[in-house]
Image: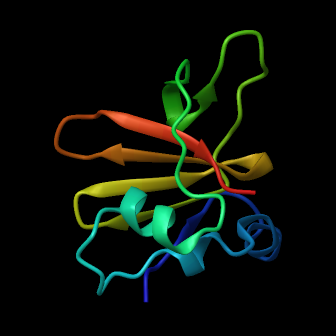
Amino acid sequence: MLTWLTYIDPQKAIEALGLIPSFLDENDSRSASQQIAKNYIGGWLPMAGFNLGEGMRLLYPDDPPLDPIATVRLRDELITVYPYGWVAICQCNDGSFEVSRCD
């Protein structure tokens, strides 16, 4: 079972994460985005225009920054969940990332 690091009260984090943890399985050799695409009815649909700031803040032009709720490491990827169901998957080897909504 993957161990999530929470940045807010753990009980509130569990509520905010919803079903997102169930989309990922450390025994599945596929990437996080491939697992989410398969296990989440909404799929994995990356959106352009996001940046990551200090402390893994999620930034989008003209929107307030979003602080992370929780993160988990899956092999060479760091999955970070934000309010409103936003999820970022960062590649640890090169720092590239994608952001999609999983609400």
Residue 22 coordinates in the image, percent (x, y): 58, 81
Q: Where on the picture, by quarter, is residue 45?
A: top right
Residue 20 coordinates in the image, percent (x, y): 63, 69
Name the image quarter holding the N terminus: bottom left
Residue at 17% in and 43% down: 93
Residue 50 coordinates in the image, percent (x, y): 55, 23
From the viewer's side, name the closer residue of 103 and 54: 103
Residue at the far left: name it: 93
Q: Where on the picture, by quarter, is residue 73?
A: bottom left
Left or right, residue 93 beside residue 55: left
From the viewer's side, name the closer residue of 72 and 37: 37
Left or right, residue 11 beside residue 99: right
Name the image quarter holding the C terminus: bottom right
Residue at 47% in and 70% down: 38
Residue 14 coordinates in the image, percent (x, y): 74, 75
Left or right, residue 1 beside residue 61: left
From the viewer's side, name the closer residue of 96 and 71: 96
Residue at 73% in and 59% down: 8
Residue at 59% in and 33% down: 57
- The vertical placement of 10 against 62, above or below, is below
